[in-house]
Image (cartoon, helix red, strand yellow):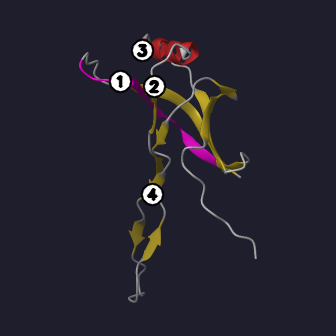
Amino acid sequence: MPRYDPSATFRFSVEIDGVLVARFSECSGLEFSADPEEYREGGLNSHTHRLPTRFKFNDITLKRGIANDGRPLWTWVQNTVKGQIVTHDVTVTLYDVKGDVLQSWTLRGAFPIKWSATPLQADQNAVAVETLTLAHQGMDFAQ
């Protein structure tokens, strides 16, 4: 019987419209949920039916060290702030220990909704990190 081990979380990439634009050290928010609606059927007293409602997809948060390789990403953020909202498909790909694709999530119609940087402190010896949060219209899964 084959053995299936979970993948380490540090082996992933982020692409926008199929192009690797920046390297990220963290990606969070890959989740969705639905609040089930309860329906009480007349004459049925043993239970209530629980039906799915609309699914809600969480915002995705990406973190990385600030570097000068993110010009296309920064241009996208700046254009959004200026009201030039362009959506892109963003794909997060997780790799196994051999470097083969384990799982991919494609966020349809993503756009930036928040950007922040860590505090800049002269008395600290830490990497400056920028955080980008994306909203999107839904998520597709691929293996």
Q: Which residue is mark 1?
A: 116
**Nearest to N terminus: mark 1 or mark 3:** 3
Q: Does 97 appear above or below 77?
A: below
Check whether the beta carbons of the residues at disc 1 and disc 4 lie within 8 A of each other.
no
Give the Cα distance between marks 2 and 1: 12 Å
Q: Which residue is mark 3?
A: 81
**Which amino acid type is marked by label 2?**
Gly
**Which amino acid type is marked by label 3?**
Val
**Nearest to N terminus: mark 4 or mark 3:** 4
Q: Residue at x 56, y 16 (%)?
A: 69
22 relative to 59 in the view: left or right: right
121 relative to 9 in the view: left or right: left
Where residue 115 sits in the image (x, y, percent)? 39, 24
21 relative to 75 in the view: left or right: right
Q: Which residues are magenta?
A: 123-140
**SS for dot 2:** strand
**Nearest to N terminus: mark 2 or mark 4:** 4
Badge number at residue 34: 4
Question: In the rendered picture of this protein, how many numbered marks are placed on residues?
Answer: 4
Answer few, some or many: residues within 10 Å of disc 1's Cα (few below 14, many 20 plus, some between 14 and 19).
few
Q: Does 48 appear above or below 140?
A: below
55 relative to 120 in the view: left or right: right
Where residue 17 sits in the image (x, y, percent)? 67, 27
Give the Cα distance between marks 2 and 4: 34 Å
**Which amino acid type is marked by label 4?**
Ala
Residue 84 in view in this figure: no
**SS for dot 1:** strand
Where residue 19 sits in the image (x, y, percent)? 68, 25
Quadrant where the image shows the N terminus: bottom right
Foreground mark, 4 or 3, reads 3
Q: Does 42 appear above or below 65?
A: below
